[in-house]
């Protein structure tokens, strides 16, 4: 596989240096992901590297997805070369009964690994047609792709040496507890169980029929621990606050996933998060803290940041800016490198942060080798992040 610049990883960072990381630090390394050509992949029309929209990492396995498909991709990271290859392709329509079949666009924007599962979430959003040269008539059309209403989990199989496979196991796998693929019930109508439930919410409901990128309902972040599932919304941003939807999921008797009733009788809770007026582009639950990638709700070119909430409480209703720390500012490049996916990855025994970009800059891609280059950033420990926030009087 051909190398791009900066593929070699630095030696393990000193703990004291890691505790004082500047917000505008550049990447510590760049890691190349290599994919199989789309002509050799089922239900894929365009190159995977053009539209990577979410990441999740377990061991040496980097799971990612292209938001134009209903598939999951896995590449295997080699710390000796700083590259990830051995691409394996998983077609979700071969496991789950998708309303538009395995070839319909799912717009997967959230991936998370928890308790032996890969959790997967579509955007659940509406989209507006783009204008054509002959006028604006097409912009009046607002479309719904039924596969976008997906929320589910598929079991992971440990192959050893940090390699995990996504398995199409409808029947429970051996083990305690037994694991099987499950999803929330789906239909072709835009009135999916999740959209129907949230359409009655006094904050989110008014935005359910707005297209994504116009402050309409749009899931772009997913974080999971145990039965707790967090959905981070790119939109709507309400009163300057981003929103997180919390659900406690269970396996229903009919074989589908379903949110439990919480205190008060609702099947969900809401959190308002102060991200300086931006929405959520991705999330990750890491050892008690929640990492959040912020970004513009619309198609604005804007600075993106990573925030950390230490000792995160999923039942707390509001997180003001003094209750979190801004731990990384990503460089803004007009027209390219829009950060879409973040995930901690362990390298040399140290947790670092891998960042993948939509609309990648031309120096990140190579059509001949099907390469996409991601960035690796040093990631401050939870303890040092808390200390810096307290020293700053609570401000991130």
Image (cartoon, grey):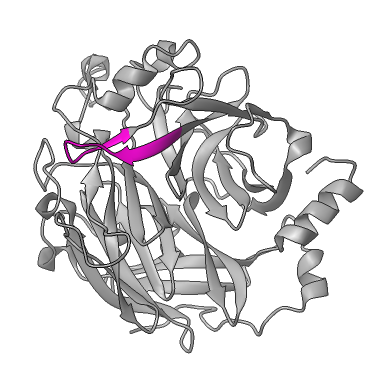
Residue in front for this viewpoint, 18 or 315: 315
On the rendered structure, is 284 left or right of 119?
right
| Residue 144 in the image, given as x and y percentages of width and height | 21, 26
Which residue is nearer to you in this view: 155 or 191?
155
Q: Is residue 309 left or right of residue 164?
A: right
Against 366, is 342 above or below? above
281 above or below 49? above
| Residue occupying the point 49% across, 42% down | 281
* Residue 59 spot, x, y in % from top left: 44, 74
**Spot occupied by residue 237 in the image (x, y as percentages of width and height):** 54, 24
Check the picture and name the quadrant holding the N terminus: bottom left
The reply, left or right, for residue 235 in relation to residue 147 is right
Residue 113 falls in which quadrant of the image?
bottom left
The quadrant of the picture occupied by the C terminus is: top right
Q: Can residue 128 be seen by looking at this rendering?
A: no
> What residue appears at the point 50 percent right and 17 percent down from the top-left corner?
264
Q: Nearer the viewer, residue 193 or 315?
A: 315
Magenta span: 247-258
């Amino acid at each position: 596989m051909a190398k791009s610049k900066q593929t070699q990883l630095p030696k393990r960072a000193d703990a004291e240096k890691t505790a004082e990381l500047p917000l505008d630090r550049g990447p510590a390394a760049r890691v190349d992901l290599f994919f199989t050509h789309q002509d050799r992949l089922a239900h894929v029309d365009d190159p995977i590297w053009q539209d990577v929209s979410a990441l999740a990492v377990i061991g040496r396995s980097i799971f990612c997805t292209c938001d134009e498909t209903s598939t999951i991709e896995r590449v295997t990271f080699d710390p000796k070369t700083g590259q990830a290859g051995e691409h394996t392709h998983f077609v979700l329509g071969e496991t789950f009964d998708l309303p538009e079949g395995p070839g319909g666009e799912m717009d997967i924007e959230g991936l998370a690994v928890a308790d032996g599962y890969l959790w997967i979430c579509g955007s659940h959003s509406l989209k507006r047609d783009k204008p054509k040269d002959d006028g604006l008539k097409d912009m009046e059309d607002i479309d719904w792709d039924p596969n976008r209403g997906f929320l589910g989990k598929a079991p992971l199989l440990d192959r050893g040496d940090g390699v995990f496979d996504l398995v199409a196991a409808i029947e429970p796998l051996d083990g305690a507890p037994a694991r099987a693929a499950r999803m929330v019930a789906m239909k072709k109508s835009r009135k999916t169980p999740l959209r129907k439930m949230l359409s009655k919410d006094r904050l989110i409901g008014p935005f359910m029929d707005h297209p994504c990128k116009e402050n309409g309902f749009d899931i772009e972040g997913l974080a999971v621990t145990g039965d707790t599932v967090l959905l981070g919304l790119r939109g709507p941003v309400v009163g300057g606050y981003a929103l997180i939807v919390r659900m406690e999921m269970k396996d229903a008797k009919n074989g589908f996933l379903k949110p439990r009733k919480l205190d008060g009788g609702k099947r969900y809770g809401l959190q308002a998060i102060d991200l300086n007026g931006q929405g959520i582009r991705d999330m990750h639950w890491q050892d008690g803290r929640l990492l959040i990638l912020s970004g513009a709700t619309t198609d604005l070119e804007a600075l993106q940041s990573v925030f950390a909430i230490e000792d995160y409480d999923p039942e707390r209703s509001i997180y003001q800016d003094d209750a979190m720390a801004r731990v990384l500012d990503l460089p803004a490049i007009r027209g390219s490198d829009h950060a879409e996916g973040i995930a901690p990855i362990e390298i040399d025994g140290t947790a670092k942060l891998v960042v993948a970009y939509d609309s990648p800059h031309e120096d990140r891609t190579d059509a001949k080798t099907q390469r996409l280059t991601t960035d690796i950033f040093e990631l401050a420990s939870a303890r040092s992040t808390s200390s810096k926030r307290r020293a700053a009087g609570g401000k991130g």
